[in-house]
Image (spheres, helix red, strand yellow):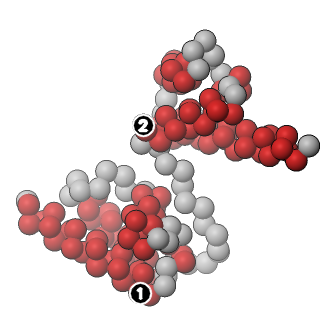
Amino acid sequence: MISKMMDKSYRQKALAKIHIARKELGLSDIEYRDLIDSVAPGKESAADLSEEQLHLLVNRFYQLGWRPRVRRTENGPLPPMVWKARHLWLDLYALGAVHHPGWSSLARFSKRMTGVEDLRRLDVHQATIVIEALKDWLERTKGKS
């Protein structure tokens, strides 16, 4: 019984991700159905997919560049160092060095640099590492221009 509840929970979460990704990527109905068909030939609805096929479909959305938004775990303002990193990230985006300006992309960068994806959980040392890496990247990008 527990495994069936876990299956249902995974299924619901995967379907939710799929519908959010479709909306955020702006896929038409035809494009969406073609994507489903590429993962599970003959099927036209995500509701008809097995768990394995749902997983494959979510992975296809990742391949298309979709990323889920970073969930905020706490209420309240972000620390000033996070805002500094955000401004540097947007500067890099304006110069074309970054392809996705969203918070989730910055969070993934942070995770690569520090191992911490939730920007609210960065300590001062970790935030400094992220900021300095962004500054160096910005200088290299400006030097190429």
Identify which amino acid the numbered label 2 is placed on. Leu
Q: Quadrant of the C terminus?
A: bottom left
In the image: residue 39, left or right of residue 7: left
Image height of 30 relative to 47, above or below: above
Identify which amino acid the numbered label 1 is placed on. His
In the rendered image, which residue does mark 1 sit on? 125
Spot the residue most to the top.
Answer: 42
Image height of 7 relative to 141, above or below: above
Q: What's the mark number on residue 1?
A: none
Question: Which residue sits at x=49%, y=72%?
Answer: 116
Task: Tell me whether circle 1 and circle 2 mark residues in contact (CB < 8 Å).
Answer: no
Question: Which residue sits at x=47%, y=71%?
Answer: 115
Foreground of the two, 114 or 71: 114
Image height of 109 relative to 7, above or below: below
Q: Position of residue 127 (x, y in %)?
A: 41, 80
Question: Which residue sits at x=37%, y=56%?
Answer: 101
User: Which SS class for mark 2?
Assistant: loop
Say few, some or many: other residues with alpha carbon within 10 Å of mark 1 (under 14 / 14 to 19 / 20 or more): few
Question: Which residue sits at x=21%, y=73%?
Answer: 136
Spot the residue most to the right.
Answer: 1
In the rendered image, which residue does mark 2 sit on? 64
Asked whether residue 23 is in view, the answer is: no
Q: Position of residue 129 (x, y in %)?
A: 35, 80
